[in-house]
Image (cartoon, rainbow, N blue to C red):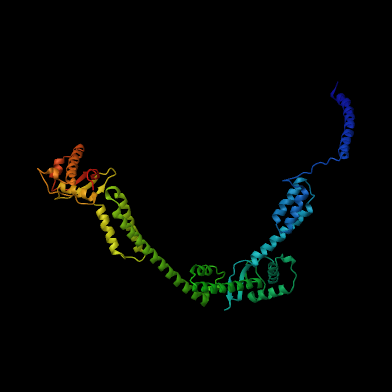
Amino acid sequence: MTRLKRVTIVLPLVVLMLGAVVPVLLERDDSVRASGVQVPEARVSGRTAGEWAKLAGEALKRGRLRKALSCIKTAESINPGTQYATELREIRKAGRRASEVERLTLRLAEGPVDHVVFGEDGAVVAAHRQATVLPGESLWTLARDLVAAERGLPGSEVADDRDVYRAWDALTALNGVRELEVGERVRVPLSFTEQTALADANRRDHQRIASASSALAAGDIDEAARLRGEFEERFVETTAECRLLDGALAVAIEERTARLELERELELVEDAREALARVPEMPRATRHSDRLDVLNGARATLSEAEAFRGGVQYPDAAELVARLLSEETRFTIGTDGTVLAAKPTGVSYTRAARQVVEWVLERELRSSGRSFPYSHEKSADEKAWARYLADAARAAGESGTDFTALLEAVDEAVELRLPDPVAYFVD
């Protein structure tokens, strides 16, 4: 059977089947409607298209144009089409209007003030800013735009009323009655509202001067300085009242600084003296490093105290610290208790060793004056000294040092390493 014949036979069958199916579908749709079951309305983030459109309208009323545009586009996306075209046009129209108002405001009412003259009471005598002329502009259109910027409206919505004529008079007074050239800079007067705001700021600054002066008289320097730092305009800084305040404030701050520095200086000196008083309470034999820390700290504290005024202000304390540090660094005690000492020329080993022991113990070794055959009557220090020298000789031998050479090196400078004397001598 050819393909054409097959199609000829199948086509009537398809038509018959479609005729049977369509009524069934229609009947199902009618049955759903008849049953009263509602199809859920589409939502985005939990809201229907109508709810998003309502949010857009509320945002538009509050001037939140970006949110309004976002909401109406979300509503459109739920049920694609042009069902919110009117609302969308209103939002975009409001956006264009707001952009025009913002442009006018930035250009004519919020730029930097190029020239301002104040009266003695802070009122504005003369003031203007500058603006660049655009194509098609004249002094009259600038006057209308000035009024529009002050009212927060686009220029197209301002009629040629009395305010526009007043603005034109001000513009011609500043620039003369003439035709404008594109790109030139013309003087634009400040609005009455701006001039009033400047005058009000000057008035508030004068009140701050009075309040600061009162605070200063009461001894509250910080409050006076705070008020002085909150001036809104620079005009008040040119007044005699402000100059008087600045002078008095500078003197008060200087006096307070000097007083605080003196208090701190005396406090540091007292700290140094208290530290020096603690040194004798620390046994050198067991707390040598602590004594060094305290003395170095006292020296640094005194140095900080004297830096406030320069020079040596406390010579007695400084001399005492220097002397104690010199004595404390005369010899060096190792972490294991051994003592490192430099034996100078002309001093015997035994004399140098005795000086080291007495330095560590912070006392002189007691002598009995007895000798053989009364050795048993010798003092405890003398007996300990004999043991100490014997152990020193043994330690020197173990380290490879000729102890005899040490004893004979009277006329030589020698570095000595001596045992910790604390274990030998008892107070």
Image side of residue 293 versus residue 370, left or right = right
Q: Is residue 121 visible?
A: yes
Determine whether 195 is above or below 387 in the image: below
- Which residue is at a point 81% across and 41% down the rendered structure image? 39
**Residue at the limit of the structure toward the top, as seen here:** 1
Image side of residue 279 versus residue 231, left or right = left
Determine whether 386 is above or below 310 in the image: above
Foreground residue among 49 and 86 = 49
- Which residue is at a point 19% across and 51% down the rendered structure image? 364
Image side of residue 170 versus residue 414, left or right = right
Residue 216, x across and y down, in percent? 49, 72
Residue 43, x across and y down, in percent? 75, 45
Image side of residue 175 versus residue 271, left or right = right
Q: Quadrant of residue 394?
A: top left
Task: Please state, as top left, top right, bottom left or bottom right, where the N terminus lies in the image.
Answer: top right
Determine whether 273 is above or below 197 in the image: above
**Residue at the limit of the structure toward the bottom, as seen here:** 120
Foreground residue among 419 and 165 = 419
**Residue at the limit of the structure toward the left, as seen here:** 373
- Which residue is at a point 25% across and 48% down the rendered structure image? 332
Foreground residue among 186 and 78 = 78
Residue 226, x across and y down, in percent? 52, 67
Q: Is residue 184 visible?
A: no
How many numbered marks appear?
Answer: 0
Foreground residue among 357 and 348 = 357
Residue 95, x across and y down, in percent? 71, 58
